[in-house]
Every structure is written in C-alpha cells, then in structure tokens.
Image: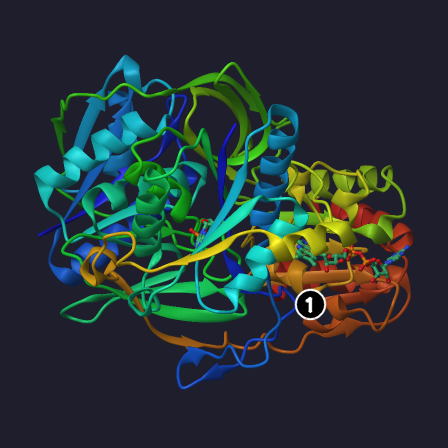
Amino acid sequence: MNIVTCIKQTFDTEAKIVIDNGQVSTQGVNLIVNPYDEYAVEESIRLKEKNGGEVVVVSVGGDKTQEALRYCLAMGADRAVLIQDPALEQADNLGCAVAMAKLISQMEYDLVFCGKEAVDDGAAQVPSMLAEKLDLPQANVLTALEIADGQATATREIDGGSEVLEMKLPAVLSAQKGLNEVRYPSLPGIMKAKRKELKVVSLADLELSAEDVAAKTELVAAELPPARKAGRVLSGEIDEMVAELVSLLKDEAKVI
Amino acid sequence: MSIVVFAEQRGGALRKITFEVISEGKRLATAAGDSLKVLLAGDNVSGLAEELKKFGPDEIAVVNSDKLADYTTESYAGVLTDYVKQENPSLVLLGHSAIGKDLAPRVTARLGAGLVSDCIEINYDGGDFSFIHPIYAGKAVATYKVNSAVKIATLRPNIFAMEEAEGAANVVDFAPEIAASRTTVKEVIQQAGDRPELTEADIICSGGRGLGNPEGFDLIEQLADALGAAVGSSRAAVDAGWRDHQAQVGQTGKVVSPNLYIACGISGAIQHLAGMGSSKCIVGINKDPEANILTVADFGIEGDLYKVVPALIEKLKEVNG
Ligand SMILES: Cc1cc2nc3c(=O)[nH]c(=O)nc-3n(C[C@H](O)[C@H](O)[C@H](O)COP(=O)(O)OP(=O)(O)OC[C@H]3O[C@@H](n4cnc5c(N)ncnc54)[C@H](O)[C@@H]3O)c2cc1C
Ligand SMILES: Nc1ncnc2c1ncn2[C@@H]1O[C@H](COP(=O)(O)O)[C@@H](O)[C@H]1O
C-alpha cells in the first residue's frame, strides 16, 4: 500500500506573533510539523507497517521545510519530496494543491493523507482541493479509519456527532486529533532518516508554469487582535463572589 | 450581480449558521446593490424555503433529489458549482461548519476561484470585498483580497448577527444533473443528550485538569444544566481520557465564540485561549491566583472549583426560580 502524506511546516503553537510592516514576521520562530499532519504521518506509517508499501511525505515550502520532512522520515516515512519554487512563495492554498496534485498524479499511490487544517492559516482547504484536482473521493476530519480490500471505512467528525463514510481507494483523507497517538522519532529513526531520499523539485520539473499556481487570494495585511480589556478578579467569601458574579453576568454583561 | 448563499440543512432541518450567513449575505448585497440568492439543496426540502424567506433573499433556488438525502461532497459540490456557473455571482458564502469546510474548497478548486475560510467580518468598500480571517489561532487577524471573478468565503459560526429582512423571496426550481458520490454515508452518530453543539452554543461550561478526576465533569454538567449550556474541555482533560476529544476547545480542538465561556480548573494556556479567546464574556474559576485564565477572564474567581461551582449552581437556581 503506497501512501502520499502531505505535511506543512508551521510555527510552533507556543510562538509569539510579531507583525512587521503588516505581515507576520518569521524571525526567530521555532518551526514544527503542523500538529494535524503528525496524525496523518502516524496513520500512514501504521498502515504501511500493516500492509507493506511505502510512505512518501510531500510538502510545498522553502529551504527550512527540509527539516520538517526529515522529522517525518525519522518517524518512519520512506522518502520525501519538497516542491520548492520562487513562484510558490506567494501561492495560496489552491496553488499549493495544484502543484502537489501534479506531483502526486505522477506517482503510484493508494491513498493521499493530509492534516485536517494547518494551524497557521487555519484554512482547512488543501485536502479537498487536492481531492478535486486528483478527481478522487474525499473524507475530512477523521477520528478513525479502517482499510480492507481496497476500501476505506472512515469516521469523520461533524457538527454534533460523527458519521461513518465508505469509499473505494484511492481517496484523499484528512486527520483530526483522536485518530491515533503520535510516536516520537527514535534515535535509530533519526540516524536512518539522514540517509533517506529527500528530493527537491521545481515547478518546471512538474511541467507547471507560474500562472498555473497564481494566487487568487492575497493576504493584504495582518495585525494583532485588539487586546481584551483587563478583567476583574472578584474577592470576598464564596457566597458573596458568586452572588456578585451572577449579577454581573445578568446586568452588566447581559449574557445570562 | 448577485451574492449566492448555500443554505445548510441536515436531515431536513436548517442549521442556525444558515440564518447567520444569509443575514450577512443580505447586508453585503444591500451594500453592493446586488441581489441575494439562496441555494437550498436536499431531499424533500421545499418546505424549508418559508423559513429562509424571513431573512430577505430575492430568490431561493430549490433542488430536491433522493441523491441529496445525505450530505456527500461530490454530489453537493456538483450542485453548488452548477448553480454558481448559472448565476455568475460576485460572492458565494457558506458557513464554516463541518459541511461548509468540506464543500467550499472542493467547489473553489472546481471553479478555479479564491476562497477565504473562517471569516469573522466581510467588508464592501464600494468596489471590492475584503475578508477578515483570524490566523495563527487568533493570535493575529488578517485581511484578504480575492482576485477571481467569483469570490468564495466561509463564515465562522456564532459571530454574524441573525437579522430578519425584506426581499422578493421568489422560489424557483433548480434541476441540475446530480453526480453520483463515490463516498456513501453508512451511519450518522449523534452525540447523546440534547445539549447545544459547541460551535453554536450561547454558553459553554468547560472543565480542565483542575477537576482532578473524570467524575468532576458531573459538576460541570450540573452547571451546564443550570445555564442551558454546552460542555467543553481543555486538552489536558481530554488527554487524560475524562472527556471525548469532540469536547476539546482550543488550537487543536474547536474554535468557539459563545456569549459566555466559563472555564473551571483550566490554567488558560495559549493553545486553549486560541479556541475561546473570541468569546464575548469569559469567566475563570481557578484556585491559583497566578493562573493565566484569571488575567484574561472578564470576571475571575480565585478559589476551589469544588466550593465555587456548587455555590454558583445554587445561586443560579435561586435567581432563575
Ligand atoms: C501543539 C499543541 C496543541 C495544543 N492544543 C490545545 C487545545 O486545543 N486545547 C487545550 O486546552 N490545550 C491545548 N494544548 C495544551 C495546553 O498547552 C495545556 O497543556 C492545556 O490547555 C492545559 O490544560 P488545563 O488547563 O486543563 O490543565 P493545567 O494547565 O494543568 O491547569 C489546571 C488548572 O486547574 C487549577 N486547579 C487545580 N485544582 C483546582 C481546584 N480544585 N479548583 C480550581 N482550580 C483548580 C490549577 O491551578 C491550574 O491552573 C496544546 C498543546 C500543544 C503543544
Ligand atoms: N504547503 C503545504 N505543503 C504540504 N501540505 C500542505 C501544505 N499546505 C497545506 N497542506 C496540507 O493540507 C492540510 C490542510 O491545510 P490548510 O488547507 O492550509 O489548512 C495540512 O494539514 C497539510 O496536510
């Protein structure tokens, strides 16, 4: 079973955001594998361990993204492909999906795995866009997955519950927290990862032009959210504090 | 020009987000001098058009088919894409709900358009729309422009006000060819109980590691009962196995914007704040005066939640009779 797993390198979730000239500054920020993508990588490796085949991790990114891909190789992925091109630096999610779909369409695969959402742009767009570009069925936000006889049974989180979907492979799936417990790379894993193949390809290698990935959306400006006004810590005996809280919620905040 | 809204229904019932999205669609259509058109798709859903009329659409296009009985991406994507191609609108709006998140990017890719997800505000400046979307889990707010002819956006639930309005409210049939779906829905599992869904709830009571044990959530449930609230959780409580991960609020959980969020035994880590920081009013109950939640809360109570919460429940019962 051959699996392509798409991973994005994102800011550490602890990172403090600094705005420089209307854009988010990347200076000095610790970079990680998008947390949801770790669930996708973990699930891919487990499927490979069970069924054989290989896991190829794919990303659209820059020089530093190699570190994120190496991390996934250390977890147990077999090889990596980085799509890197100046024309992709301003690309939006559709542009990234177009580039990855072109790469993936030239590979042999049974499954494409993504995270349900990248924690930087919080878009939740790329998996469905990939599915469309690859003309495949999709199932997003998965908390459980079973694969047997070329068929996937996937439990997807929906508002107020979940639903179980069935589809024939190949398909594009996206992982939600709860799908599995993510492993840490082992020391031998880290050593082995250094020798695994990490290929860098450009748009030209994929026979795509800058126009094929031209952005339809543009982030014009970013700013920090307005600070919440300082709150009030109540004091006194419990009964007094509770009575004060209830009247504040009723009369001042008008939320109950 | 027109603005198209996708009306979300599941099992023949319209979702609250639908009314929020139509209301925002109406405000934008009025500002831009566009007409507002609503696409209502499903099996036997014509009866729902009456409810939609109250929010002022100029047209409601209804598609009925047994192939649309369950939401499946491919069948619905085909219907929405066909409608957009027929209407050629300037803007297409959906909810940033489980369905909207799944559908919007697929349709966007099919149309080769631009999509801004999870908007908390959309503005029209006389010539163009701009889209405001929180990034980095709300640690920053970004303004986007879209340069495709059709611009697509999903709207965060519980942010946009529902507002009734006047409109021509013509109901028309729309009968596209409906594509077969390669996914089939085997089972839908509804969460037990009749609590509101977290992303739609007006009030949320959440518990964290400070509860000390899974039974602590019984107390949070009682508080939620007294307020008609939904129950949320921090990641620590989910990871401890005290609560299903569906209840997790935060950066790797749900993003919620209730009117009132009560955090009990939650420290207020940055990843938790990412999920509930846009709540209108935050209450923190924590025994540690240094806990971050007490600095971000509108109202904080420093104390043992096992003493504070029962007293609060009593007081609420007393006040509400
Ligand atoms: C990549 C990543 C993603 C994450 N995503 C999320 C997320 O989505 N959501 C999330 O919540 N966290 C998330 N976290 C985890 C987050 O960093 C915190 O670890 C977590 O929120 C802590 O949960 P807590 O507040 O319940 O526990 P703690 O931090 O342990 O806080 C417990 C609090 O309870 C108080 N307390 C104890 N006993 C009592 C009592 N009797 N009465 C009153 N107060 C009491 C304590 O003073 C303390 O402040 C994420 C972390 C990472 C690295
Ligand atoms: N630049 C990228 N490179 C590889 N995968 C990506 C990239 N951007 C998004 N993805 C994948 O798509 C998922 C959803 O991302 P997003 O649509 O940006 O929220 C991520 O969890 C990744 O699996």
* Residue at left offset 31%, top offset 36%: A134
Q: Quadrant of residue B124?
A: bottom left
* Residue at left offset 34%, top offset 30%: A136
Q: Quadrant of residue A219?
A: bottom left
- Choose between A19 and A182: the one closer to the eye: A182
- State whether residue B142 appears in this view: yes
In this image, B232 relative to B255: left or right?
right
* Residue at left offset 32%, top offset 70%: A86
- Choose between A233 and A31: the one closer to the eye: A31
In this image, A115 relative to A209: left or right?
right
Instruction: Using the image, determine if residue B225 lies above or below residue A204.
Output: above
Q: Which residue is mark 1?
A: B297
- Few, some or many C-alpha atoms within 10 Å of disc 1 (few <14, some 14-19, many ≥20)? many
Q: Amino acid at mark 1?
A: Ala
Q: Residue lying at the far bottom in this picture: please name it.
A: A21
- Percent coordinates x, y for residue B41 in the rendering: 26, 27
Instruction: Using the image, determine if residue B138 lies above or below residue B73.
Output: below
- Choose between A60 and B163: the one closer to the eye: A60
- Percent coordinates x, y for residue A220 in the rendering: 31, 74
